[in-house]
Structure formats: structure tokens, C-alpha cells
Image (cartoon, rainbow, N blue to C red):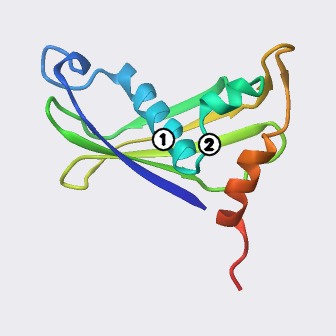
Amino acid sequence: MYITKISIRIHYALTDQMGVVYHGHYAQFYEIGRTEAIRQLGFTYKDMEAMGIIMPVVDIHSNFLRPAKYDDLITVITTLREMPVHHKILFHSEIYNEEEQLLNAGDVTLYFMESKTMTRCAMPANLKNKLQPYFEEKG
């Protein structure tokens, strides 16, 4: 299992008139978590795009449990629970406030695709090699 954490301060532009984070922004929080999770492996989306591979979102689920509010410092925990197989990768995200209360949980599925042909492809070998140690049996 591969797990990363990133903190984000909620600024005013992310909130509605009541000072509560607008629900549509949670997809951005998931994306920030995914991007930083890949970066912490020493690989980036930019690297992938230079290789001609893109990662479109094909499915997203989000559960809203408590509101995030203006000036909160939230923590986005991004988890790959399983080693990606073939062309599909699923990221699980959990968002907590400073009191460690779970605010939101969601899953995002993306495909690895060749940008020129828009056809599904395997995960880049470089990324696979960086992820593999997190999914090896310890024994």
C-alpha cells in the first residue's frame, strides 16, 4: 500500500457565503493529493505527459461527512490500496481537519492513455518500478 499526506490551507476563494468549502472543490483536493503522491515517488504528471501518456479521470465518488471551513488546515491522505493493473489506477482520498475529524472520503479512477491515439495503455514502467516496493509481500 502506498500512502501520502499533504496539507492545504482553505482560502476564502474556496468557500461559499457561509465560509464553507464549496463541494466542487473536493475534486481539486483529490487532484492535489494524487499529483503530490506521484511527485513524492520522484515521478511527475509532467514526466508522463512528456512520454505521451495522459491520465484522464473516468470515475469519481465523494462522500461528504463534515464541512471544511475558511482558514482550516486540511490534510489530504492519498492511498493506492492495490498495485495498478493494466491501464487503470484507483486513488482513495481522505480529508481531515486539524482536529483529525474525517471530513470527506472519495475514490477517483483514472486510465493511462496514449495522448496521440487516445487509447488505453499500460502504466509507464518508470512509475511501476517506483510503486512496486510498496506492494511487495514482507516476509
Left or right: 85 in relation to 90: right
Q: Quadrant of residue 124?
A: top right
Give the image location of residue 73, x and y in percent.
21, 42
Q: Residue at x 67, y 23 (%)?
A: 56
Residue that sits furthest to the bottom in the current view: 139
Dot 1 surroundings within 10 Å: few (below 14), some, or many (20 or more)?
some
Q: Is residue 16 visible?
A: yes
Q: Is residue 58 left or right of residue 116?
A: left
| Mark closer to the observer (1, 2) | 2
The residue that appears at 69% across and 65% down in the rendered structure is: 133
Calculate the distance from the C-alpha at mark 1 to the C-alpha at mark 2: 9 Å
Secondary structure, mark 1, is helix
Left or right for 108, reference 31: right
Q: In the displayed structure, would residue 114 be above or below residue 64?
A: above
Is residue 55 or residue 102 the one in the foreground? 55
* Crowd rating for badge 2 (residues with CA inside 10 Å; few <14, some 14–19, many 20+): some
Q: Position of residue 61 (x, y in %)?
A: 53, 33
Say which element carries label 2. Answer: loop
Q: Residue at x 72, y 70 (%)?
A: 136
Rendered-image quadrant of the C terminus: bottom right
Question: Mark 2: which amino acid?
Answer: Phe
Q: Quadrant of residue 50?
A: top right
Q: Which mark is residue 36?
A: 1
- Which residue is pictured at 65% across the width and 34% down the height? 109
Looking at the image, is mark 1 or mark 2 earlier in the sequence?
1
80 or 123, nearer to the observer: 123
> What x and y, as percent, mark residue 23?
34, 23
Type of amino acid at the residue the image marks with label 1:
Glu
Q: Quadrant of the N terminus?
A: bottom right
Q: Position of residue 42 (x, y in %)?
A: 58, 48
Horizontal side, residue 24 vs residue 2: left or right: left
Per the rendering, the mark at residue 43 is 2
